[in-house]
Image (cartoon, rainbow, N blue to C red):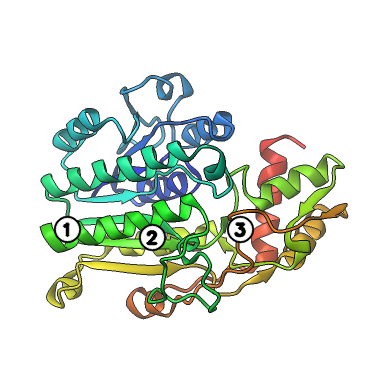
Amino acid sequence: MKILVTGAAGFIGFHVAKILSEEGHRVIGLDNVNDYYDVNLKYGRLEKLGVSRTNAEQYGLTTTSSLFPDLSFIRISLEDRVQLECIFEKEKFDVVCHLAAQAGVRYSLENPHAYIQSNIEGFMNILECCRYHQISHLVYASSSSVYGLNKKIPFESSDRTDRPASLYAATKKSNELMAHTYSHLFGLPSTGLRFFTVYGPWGRPDMALFIFTKAILSGKPIEVFNLGEMARDFTYIDDICEGVIKILKDPLQKRKENGELYKIYNIGNSRPVKLMDFIQAIERALEMEASKELMPMQPGDVQATWANVDHLIRDYGYQPHTPIQVGVQRFIEWYKSYYRI
């Protein structure tokens, strides 16, 4: 297939683009490489895809990978509607894997406009391009944050999601509603994936695993919010990619026959881990003990997440299998190698 992967310099997008390329698909990766976090990490991911930083820094330039002859990268912003339409017109994609977004719950309190521009306007442009260029399937990233103040766990895809606790969550719920509208009005097959706390090598520096590891190695205390009384459905990157790619490959025949053009799935580990147990796994992998500062809950945060993935298991045979100890150990090994510790 010929597949567009947005957010190709991002954590999940990089891994998905790499696996698809290794499988022999034609992949076009897009990313604006913004400075929300260290751009060196983003360019490092692109270099692993065979895209040099010199070329990747040039806006609008199409660069063919030196490692994967069927992978190309273009640096553009999804808000650039004219440029995006030109890419769709030229490349004639089969499917779109939309993973680009302004990420981060806490940052949405500081810079809300970035979320509207990227997550709403950018997603709108993706939908319009899919509509007018006969895209057979749009797979896009939603988030577990849409469950917001929902107290019922595990979270099920049918649960109410109308009480977001952050603007980031509100934009992700908006994406789901927008996709539903395009599926209903224009027959665009779409699948939204509610990701649950993805972690692993090449992960984001604003996520807990990265923050805790850096602090512990630097001899600094880590901030443990809600006095440690939190739990997250941590999901290893390989398990996430397995689910995403299975869905991308689906010809959707059964769904089309049943009139199910629009679907939402939880994609997580379905095994929530207590925050203190997560920290303990990091300490064991580092063979160092963390100094902990117990803090109150942060604005926009929730106490627990837990994914019910029964529908994904039923429809795609999705089965996450990476234990937290194994996933954390792999991240620590990558972190030490990347930062030469």
Residue on which disc 2 sits: 244
Q: x and y percent of residue 193 in the render?
A: 39, 62
Instruction: Classify 123 as above or below 194.
Output: above
Q: Residue at x 47, y 40 (%)?
A: 112
Instruction: Classify 95 as above or below 280.
Output: above
The residue under label 3 is which amino acid type?
Asp
Residue on which disc 1 sits: 188
The residue under label 1 is which amino acid type?
Leu
- Viewer-closest of 318 and 216: 216
The residue under label 2 is which amino acid type?
Val
* CA separation in Å, label 3 and label 1: 33 Å
Residue 56 seen in this snapshot: yes
Decide: few, some or many residues near mark 3? Use Cα within 10 Å; few <14, some 14-19, many ≥20. some
Q: Residue at x 67, y 70 (%)?
A: 273
Residue on which disc 3 sits: 301
Whichever of labels 3 and 1 marks the residue nearer the N terminus, that label is 1
> Element under label 3?
loop
- Viewer-closest of 241 and 166: 166
> Element under label 2?
helix
Image-quadrant location for residue 295 = bottom right
Q: x and y percent of residue 72 in the render?
A: 32, 34
Q: Residue at x 37, y 32 (%)?
A: 65
Q: x and y percent of residue 94 in the render?
A: 19, 50
Judge left or right: residue 311 versus residue 272.
left
Q: x and y percent of residue 310 in the render?
A: 42, 80
